[in-house]
Image (spheres, rainbow, N blue to C red):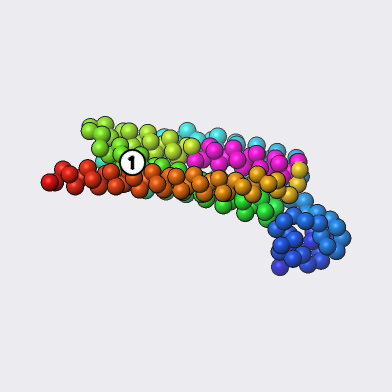
């Protein structure tokens, strides 16, 4: 309940007012979610924490995905497990520094980005499984690349959004509202690619038994 009260006058604020980062109807104060010095500390701590884990995390992922590549499509599940674990360990905490609107749009965008990179991983896993001899190694590299793409792009987005939240406040620009829509478009394209890769794989496999 306290989360729906103005931090200045403690009067109740309607969720729509809070979500759109409008001034408090009672006192006119606009919620402030992160001071600039706090934001820079969050960004530095985020970079330092991931910097200490980056090398061994990617090394473990590459090895695990390569071994899992011996089983059809298992590398995809390994990569998704790593993406979800890294999302929870690295990407969730900075979201609490955002106002409601930016927290929603950023979180939704990251979820769609996770789905997109997961689908790309699936498509690559399906197609690389048809490469003779070295398919497991290629699968490991593909999973490593897509997971790194997900994490590093998400970190860049979060660092950028935290700084903007501190410098310019919680009110969103129009393009920030459009960001989840663009991410949804990427997810739909990746879905089409994953379906096409799976159909092609099934066609090849069934052709071998004719």
Can residue 63 be spotted in the picture?
no
Q: Which residues are drawn in magenta? A: 150-167
Question: Closest to the observer: 82 or 12?
Answer: 12
Does dot 1 land on a helix, a strand or a loop? helix
**Looking at the picture, does residue 25 appear above or below residue 68?**
below
User: Residue 55: horizontal and vertical position, in percent?
Assistant: 47, 33
Packing grade of label 1 (10 A; few <14, some 14-19, many >=20) is: many
Question: Closest to the observer: 132 or 2?
Answer: 132
Residue at screen point 34% across, 45% down: 196
Query: Which quadrant of the structure image shows residue 29?
Result: bottom right
User: Residue 156: horizontal and vertical position, in percent?
Assistant: 59, 37
Where does label 1 land, which residue?
Answer: 125
Q: Quadrant of the N terminus?
A: bottom right
Residue at screen point 79% across, 61% down: 6
User: Residue 36: horizontal and vertical position, in percent?
Assistant: 75, 41
Can residue 168 be spotted in the picture?
yes
Q: Left or right: where does residue 60 sit relative to residue 16?
A: left
Query: Which quadrant of the structure image shows residue 190?
Result: top left
User: Residue 27: horizontal and vertical position, in percent?
Assistant: 87, 60
**Looking at the picture, does residue 22 appear above or below residue 34?**
below
Residue 165 colored in magenta in the image: yes
Question: Closest to the observer: 118 or 209?
Answer: 209
Please, what is the dominant secondary structure of the magenta stretch?
helix
């Amino acid at each position: 309940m306290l989360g729906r009260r103005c931090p200045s006058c403690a009067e109740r604020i309607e969720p729509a007012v809070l979500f759109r980062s409008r001034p408090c109807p009672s006192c006119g104060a606009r919620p402030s979610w992160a001071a600039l010095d706090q934001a820079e500390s969050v960004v530095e701590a985020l970079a330092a924490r991931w910097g200490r884990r980056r090398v061994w995390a990617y090394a473990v992922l590459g090895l695990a995905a390569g071994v899992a590549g011996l089983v059809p499509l298992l590398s995809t599940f390994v990569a998704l497990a790593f993406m979800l674990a890294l999302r929870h360990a690295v990407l969730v905490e900075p979201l609490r520094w955002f106002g409601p609107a930016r927290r929603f749009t950023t979180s939704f965008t990251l979820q769609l980005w996770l789905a997109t990179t997961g689908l790309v991983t699936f498509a690559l896993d399906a197609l690389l499984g048809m490469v003779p001899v070295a398919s497991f190694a290629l699968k490991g590299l593909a999973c490593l690349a897509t997971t790194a793409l997900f994490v590093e792009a998400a970190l860049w987005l979060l660092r950028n959004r935290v700084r903007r939240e501190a410098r310019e406040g919680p009110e969103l620009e129009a393009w920030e509202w459009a960001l989840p829509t663009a991410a949804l478009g990427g997810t739909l394209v990746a879905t089409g690619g994953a379906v096409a890769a799976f159909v092609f794989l099934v066609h090849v496999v069934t052709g071998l038994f004719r």
